[in-house]
Amino acid sequence: MGGDVSGTFTTAVAAAAAAPSYGGGPAESQYVSSKTSVWWDIENCHVPKNCDAHAIAQNVSSALAKMNYCGSFHLRLRRH
């Protein structure tokens, strides 16, 4: 059993003013419109209690947008 939560970025957003030292800064120009896919094995790595998969997907897409990644985003939850 699995489910899809998908979304597409339609507008570019400004990059964060100060990039964190761990590499969470703005996207390099060649990656700005790249597709991002996340495959999550929810059987072995459960969705946290009191969390909604749609909210998690929105948080991931928001984080990508803040780093100026504007390509399509796809999150697939998989259960064996």
Image: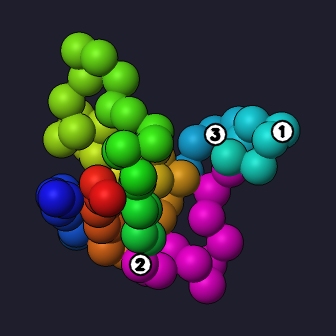
The residue to which callout 2 is attached is 35
Q: Main secondary structure of the magenta part?
A: loop
The image quarter containing residue 43 is top left
Residue 25 is situated, as x and y percent measured from the top left of the image, at 68, 50
Query: Disc 3 marks which amino acid?
Result: Ala
Q: Nearer the viewer, residue 39 or 57?
A: 39
The answer to whether any part of residue 62 appears in the image is: no
Q: In this rendering, would 80 be left or right of 22?
A: left
Up the image or down, 29 lies above or below 51; here it is below
Q: Which residue is mark 3?
A: 17
Residue 53 placement (x, y as % from top left)? 22, 39
* Residue 31: % across, % down: 57, 78
Mark nearer the N terminus (2 vs 3)? 3
Q: Nearer the viewer, residue 59 or 69?
A: 59
Residue occupying the point 61% across, 64% down: 27
Disc 1 marks which amino acid?
Ser
N-term-proximal mark, 2 vs 1: 1
State the image quarter where residue 79 is shown.
Answer: bottom left
Secondary element under disc 2, as helix, strand or loop, is loop
Across and down, in percent, residue 57 comes to 29, 46
Label 1 Cα crowd, 10 Å radius (few <14 / some 14-19 / many 20+): few
Numbered range of the magenta stretch:
25-35
**Which residue is drawn at the image coordinates 19% and 59% (left, top)?**
2
